[in-house]
């Protein structure tokens, strides 16, 4: 078989085309890798606030104590707080549950429980003060 000089020219052009394609692919790959490196960050470089956004905490029903009033639930995870909350009278528990879960004003809570706004405010203030005192008593010394 004899080689045709025209075939040699076509081979050279095809060889040059293949080299050009490979060179361009390598440039594109390196450019993409550089862009990826510029956008990536190490976990050690992130602030605590940014790390907290990435964090997910699983919540299980057994992890909290549930108090209910008027169809709304208040989940308390801390045993000391739950113990102090359970010591409150039922009416004050209901007022705090509605205040904490629904963020209702005293007048709206009064409409639900059948009290005046000022009575709800007194009960809520009293209940919060009792919680503070109970938690202060339950807290370990120096903690």
Image: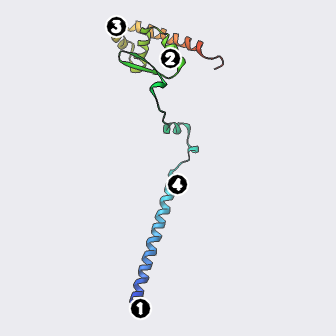
Q: Residue at x 53, y 36 (%)?
A: 49
Mark 1 or 3, nearer chain start: 1
Q: How far apart are marks 1 and 3 (CA)?
A: 105 Å
Residue 17 percent location from the top left of the image: 42, 76
Q: How crowded is mark 4: few (under 14 residues within 10 Å), some or many (20 or more)?
A: few
Q: Residues within 10 Å of mark 2 (few under 14, many from 20)?
A: some
Q: Residues within 10 Å of mark 1 (few under 14, many from 20)?
A: few
Q: Do the residues labelled 4 and 3 touch (CB within 8 Å)?
A: no
Q: In the image, is 105 to the left or to the right of 137?
A: left
Mark 4 or 3, nearer chain start: 4
Mark 4 or 2, nearer chain start: 4
**Residue 69, located in which quarter of the rendered image?**
top left
Please give the residue where the numbered disc 2 appears in the rendered image.
82
Please give the residue where the numbered disc 1 appears in the rendered image.
3
Q: Which residue ends up furthest to the right in the rendered image?
A: 142
Viewer-proximal residue among 79 and 72: 79
Q: How far apart are marks 1 and 2 (CA)?
A: 93 Å
Q: What number is the disc on residue 110?
A: none
Mark 3 residue element: loop
Residue 27 percent location from the top left of the image: 48, 66
Mark 4 residue element: helix
Mark 2 or 3, nearer chain start: 2
Q: Distance between the residues labelled 4 and 2?
A: 48 Å
């Amino acid at each position: 078989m004899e080689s045709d000089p025209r075939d040699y020219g076509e081979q050279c052009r095809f060889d040059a085309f293949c080299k050009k394609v490979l060179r361009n692919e390598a440039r594109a790959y390196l450019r993409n890798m550089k862009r990826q490196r510029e956008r990536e960050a190490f976990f050690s470089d992130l602030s605590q606030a940014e790390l907290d956004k990435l964090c997910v905490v699983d919540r299980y029903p057994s992890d909290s104590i549930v108090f209910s009033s008027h169809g709304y639930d208040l989940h308390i995870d801390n045993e000391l707080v739950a113990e102090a909350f359970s010591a409150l009278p039922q009416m004050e528990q209901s007022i705090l549950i509605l205040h904490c879960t629904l963020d209702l004003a005293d007048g709206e809570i009064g409409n639900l429980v059948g009290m005046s706004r000022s009575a709800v405010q007194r009960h809520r203030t009293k209940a919060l003060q009792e919680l503070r005192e109970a938690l202060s008593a339950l807290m370990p010394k120096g903690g």
